[in-house]
Amino acid sequence: MRVRDSIHDDRLPNSYYAATCNDMSGFRRLEGNIKVDICVVGGGFTGVAAALHLAERGYEVALVEQNRIGWGASGRNGGQVIGGYGQELSNFAKIEKTFGSGNAETVWKMGVECVDIISDWVKKYQIDCGLKWGYVDLAMKESELEELQHSKAALEAQGYPHEQKVLNATEVKNYVGSDRYIGGVTNMGWGHCHVLNLVLGEARAAEKLGVQIFEDARVSALHEREGKVIVDMDHCRVTANKVVLAGNAYLGKLVPKLASRVLPAGSYILATEPLCEKLSGQIMPAGFAACDQRWALDYFRLTPDHRLLFGGLATYSGRHPRDIVAAVKPNMIKVFPELKNTGIDYAWGGYMGIGLNRIPQVGKVADNIYYAQAYSGHGVAPTHMSAKLIAEAIEGDRSRFDIMANVKHPPFPGGQLFRQPMLAAGMAYYRMKDAMGR
Ligand SMILES: Cc1cc2nc3c(=O)[nH]c(=O)nc-3n(C[C@H](O)[C@H](O)[C@H](O)COP(=O)(O)OP(=O)(O)OC[C@H]3O[C@@H](n4cnc5c(N)ncnc54)[C@H](O)[C@@H]3O)c2cc1C
């Protein structure tokens, strides 16, 4: 099976999510020109959540998406809802080092809040996205298990409100039926969901609050004129007092400064055919989402119809593998050899936006143009936080926005031409370390 979607393909990918989506009816096309208070560019979690946060605060918002809502990483990822914002949630010392002791607690709390935003909206707007709590971090060697135990203790020391449990080699099999892991740590504050249904559910909630949502609306240029921003598309124009740029890895060269700080890296996922209850109960008995600790990590979970959704592989070359099943299935079989002859119904990939320091990038490119991007493969929950910080700043409270906006984000070395190969070489080094067990 070949990946069908490329950066230029406007259809939703051949994913499990697109095939099982609640509502594919779509949003309208903008015909003619409109004026609004705020125009959001990009219909992934960052853009949709920004529109919803702003609409909840009473702003008049238009959201423009070049393809379909959820077409980017947001509607096609692993569906793992993981906390932590700006740094690993457990590494308070690192948060203090990056943000200073005065801000560390605020940033740490945002790492918990980002998951709460999703959980609150799912309840408030009755979004049917199968949100399920339960996550297990898996260790393949003693040093990883020690690190996970240390993280658990660090979270408890900060007053983390959710239950965590350390698992030994026998206990971990109650969560992941594989011989590959020597232990793990569970976290009941993290979980998984159908991400396309989540982003579309949030978009419908925003629409009900008055947000005008347009698909098939590719922004080709931005101009500032008399204090307004003119957002030009091929066939129409939005004039706004403020703009929020939320195109992330798919924004391309629209704003060169943003492009130089985010690198699109491919990640790939398989969905098996539905497994019989016995087999799904054997491989993932607790129904948790799971992830290992390597650089080129495996992440996986069961869907409500008992498929295994297995993701992994990171490519930094800008090219998708020719055959995703051939590239990813061997990794799946290493974890679950009993799935050797299991059919694969869907295989797809997408781009996540990587930043050099792996801290989400939030800020302004001009007085009235805000942006958020670069969640480095961990964005389902953090996008919701970045969006909230932008909404707070637009409303006049810049206290939390400024903490993030003051972080320096260096551009990738090598410029447009060499940054991709340089990062690919760096990743090859870490993959080799993974393979050598270091
Ligand atoms: C395969 C894969 C698996 C992943 N798994 C996980 C996971 O399990 N858990 C996790 O936390 N994170 C995961 N991630 C990362 C996560 O999906 C992203 O961090 C997050 O979805 C980013 O959301 P976003 O809204 O910023 O960007 P996107 O969802 O990529 O949205 C950007 C949107 O902007 C639009 N756009 C761009 N340019 C323009 C323009 N000029 N005009 C109009 N529209 C434009 C695009 O079409 C796109 O729809 C994964 C990513 C991938 C690719």
Image (spheres, rainbow, N blue to C red):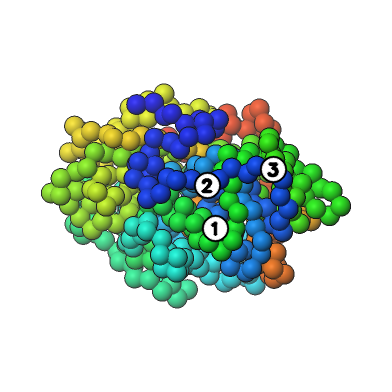
From the viewer's side, name the closer residue of 174 and 73: 73
Q: Which mark is residue 27?
A: 2
Q: Earlier in the sequence, mark 2 or mark 3?
A: 2
Q: Position of residue 293 (x, y in %)?
A: 39, 49
Q: Position of residue 147 (x, y in %)?
A: 40, 58
Outermost front residue: 32
Eyeballing the image, is 74 above or below 339? Answer: below
Give the amino acid at mark 1. Answer: Glu
Eyeballing the image, is 348 above or below 83? Answer: above
Whether residue 176 is visible: no
Label 2, label 3: how many angstroms apart (C-alpha)?
16 Å
Residue at 27% in and 44% down: 308
Q: Is residue 138 left or right of residue 421?
A: left
The reply to whether dot 2 and dot 1 touch (C-beta < 8 Å) is yes
Mark 1 lies on residue: 207
Label 2, label 1: how many angstroms apart (C-alpha)?
10 Å
From the viewer's side, name the closer residue of 1 and 411: 1
Give the amino acid at mark 3. Answer: Gly
Give the amino acid at mark 2. Answer: Phe
Residue at 80% in and 53% down: 228
- Which type of secondary structure does the marked residue at label 2 adopt? loop
Mark 3 lies on residue: 32
Q: Nearer the viewer, mark 3 or mark 1?
A: 3
Q: Earlier in the sequence, mark 2 or mark 1?
A: 2
Q: Dot 3, crowdedness within 10 Å: few (<14), some or many (≥20)?
A: few
- Which type of secondary structure does the marked residue at label 1 adopt? helix
Q: Is residue 141 left or right of residue 95?
A: left
Label 3, label 1: how many angstroms apart (C-alpha)?
19 Å
Q: Position of residue 238 (x, y in %)?
A: 71, 47
